[in-house]
Image (cartoon, grey):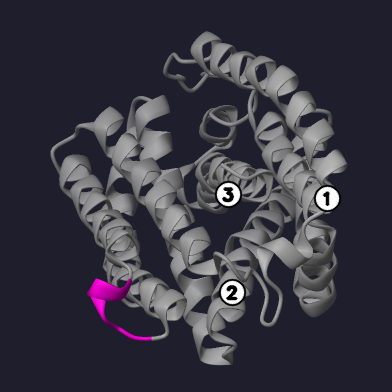
Amino acid sequence: MELTTFWFAIIAFLWTGFFVLEGFDFGVGLLAPVLSRNEAERKQVLGTIGPVWDGNEVWLITAVGAMFAAFPAWYAGLLSEFYLPIALVLVGLIVRGIGLEWRGKVHHSSDRAWCDLGILVGSALPAFLWGAVFADLLHNSALAALVGGVFSLSLCVLHGAVFVALKTSGPVRARARRTAMITSAVALPAAVVALSNIPAAGTAVADWTAAPWLWACAMSAMAALAAAVALTWRGRDGWAFAATASSIALGSVALFGALWPAPLPGLTVAEAASGPYTLGMLTWIGLIALPFVLGYQVWSYWVFRKRLVAEVS
């Protein structure tokens, strides 16, 4: 495998990790006001992502850093073309981080309300805008960007609701399941429209024989999302979360498969790549550092694997 192909696959993997892990982070941030009825329940909901949300953001930093190092022309073109939405994403991430960090340090309800608003807005902006950016990148259409944004936003809400159901108990868990079922009424139709158009964008024709593996990924992502709804209805929270995560991962594979070998219009991967020496050095660094990062994150999720119970004050 050529180093350009290898690093494109690595970057696709990093973005996929970000979409899967930050997807439920954004969903939890959006759902916290809906699922909680008092301060104890609000802490219970936000506590599901408390130990992991900042670690999940590392996937975005690593993905963008890898793009900058391995494909500087792709990095520059993407940030130039989508400067405003990406700037808004960064604003959202900053505001959300401040809200999550400061919420536990303030004592007045009005101050906590401002933190909650920051968490809500800071979760909604990236959840919508990343879908809009990549949809517009594929189709160069405002309508496609809107559909992509609605799809990614609703998918994050569904993913987050399933995660809260997995990580909590009591009334919050029951509300999370109901919210997941309600959200599926938007997420499933949006998935059909958005995911079915990814392979068509990559092949320029809606013919499955032109790129069968892209269509297989897109159809499998739809099936996984439908399975997640059915599993939630049956109360199988762990399997439901695995299904929503699989749906996001498969959709991401289809997305980057459609972007190969031209991640930007008129720019191929070979043209965007750094020189062989740079890619070689990055490969050695990545092979040494990546296993440690993955191992640490797996360990952190294992440590905080138990369900949370609302504290009665």
Q: Quadrant of residue 298?
A: top right
Tell me if residue 256 comes above or below residue 266 in the rendering: above
179 vs 258, left or right, is: left
Q: Label 1 amino acid? A: Ile
Residue drawn 59% across the image and 34% down it: 46
Residue 211 is inside the magenta segment: no
Q: Which residues are magenta?
A: 205-210
Rendering coords of residue 147 (x, y %) = 47, 80
Closer-to-camera residue (255/193)? 255
Q: Amino acid at mark 3?
A: Ala
Is 32 or 145 nearer to us in this picture?
A: 145
Measure how far apart labels 1 and 2 are at the Cα level.
Answer: 20 Å
Q: For the C terminus, give its image quadrant.
A: top right
Q: Which mark is residue 94?
A: 1
Q: How many residues crowd mark 2 within 10 Å: few (<14), some (14–19), many (20+)?
A: many
In the rendered image, the vertical position of residue 192 relative to residue 65, given as above or below:
below
Q: Give the residue at mark 2.
A: 132
| Dot 3: element | helix
Residue 124 numbered mark, or none: none
Query: At which x and y percent is residue 112?
Result: 75, 43
Q: Residue at x 42, y 26 (%)?
A: 167
- Sequence-first tag of 1 and 2: 1
From the image, tell me which residue sits under label 3.
12
Name which of mark 3 and mark 2 comes first in the sequence. 3
Residues packed near mark 1 inside 10 Å, few (<14), some (14 to 19) or many (20 plus): some
Residue at 76 percent across and 25 percent down: it is 284
Classify residue 85 by image quadrant. bottom right
Q: Residue at x 61, y 77 (%)?
A: 137
Q: Amino acid at mark 2?
A: Ala
Residue 259, horizontal then vertical, whole percent? 55, 67
Task: Choose mark 3 or mark 2, whichever is in front.
Answer: 3
Q: Earlier in the sequence, mark 1 or mark 3?
A: 3
